[in-house]
Image: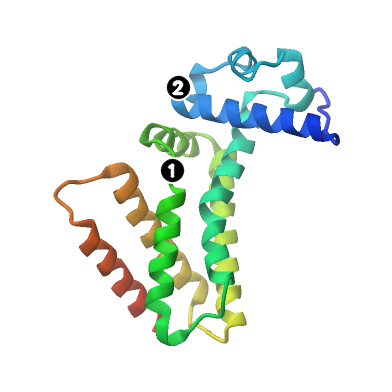
Amino acid sequence: MPNTRIPTQERSIKKKNLIIETGFNMMCDKGFYNVTTSDIAKEAKVSTGIIYQYFNDKKEIFIEGIKNYSNNILFPLIDVLESKEIDKNNIDELIKKIIDKFIENHNMTKKAHEELIAMSHIDDEISEIFRHQDMECTNKIVSIFEKNNIYLENAKEKIHIIYGLIDNLCHEIVYHKHQEIDYDIMKKEVINIILATLK
């Protein structure tokens, strides 16, 4: 595989980030297999040669985009938790804030979301990125709880279940939009389940 370079100058860093953002958005919108590096170069207004200075292939662009997207979805949730001390008596309010922040950050189109999930099922490397990000988020939340003297039995397992509940709620509200489901009620039920799990 040819050697790619890591940009150090601000202009080059911006160019690389533009390629990642453009390529990732295109592959999410049109499908990974329906976009070429030439398509990305044209849309980003750079030469194909510039793309190959920074990336070996379009999959590397897609993977960098996934990392950025995952961080933008998962880690604002961490920011909410780290922003102040956790009040054990008002934990339901904290959960509401986390859910609202998570929903706010699930801002990709349904089509893009489906492309990410599809790729995670057929590509082991992409699947591993999602698995790693999930566990990193779980471990950080456990650590924040412990810093606030909240120690849970089976903490990782409980936090991972809670993360899954919140993620599913967000997918329902942002992507699935079942008209038969009252999402205000569903949100309250998710909060109640989380509170029961944290006991």
Q: Residue at x 64, y 31 (%)?
A: 20
Image quadrant in which you'd find residue 163: bottom left
Q: Position of residue 143 (x, y in %)?
A: 61, 74
Badge 1: residue crowd in 10 Å (few <14, some 14–19, many ≥20): some
In this rendering, the label closer to the viewer, 2 or 1 = 1
**Pointer 2 with pointer 1, Cβ within 8 A:** no
Q: CA distance from mark 2 to mark 1?
A: 17 Å
Q: Which of the 4 image quarters holds residue 111?
A: top left
Mark carried by residue 107: 1
Report which quarter residue 19 is drawn in: top right
- Mark 1 belongs to which amino acid? Asn
Q: How many marks?
A: 2
Residue pointed to by mark 2: 30
- Identify the element where label 1 is drawn: loop
Q: Measuring 49% from the left and 39% from the top, which residue is drawn there?
A: 120
Query: Which color scheme did the rendering employ for the protein?
Result: rainbow
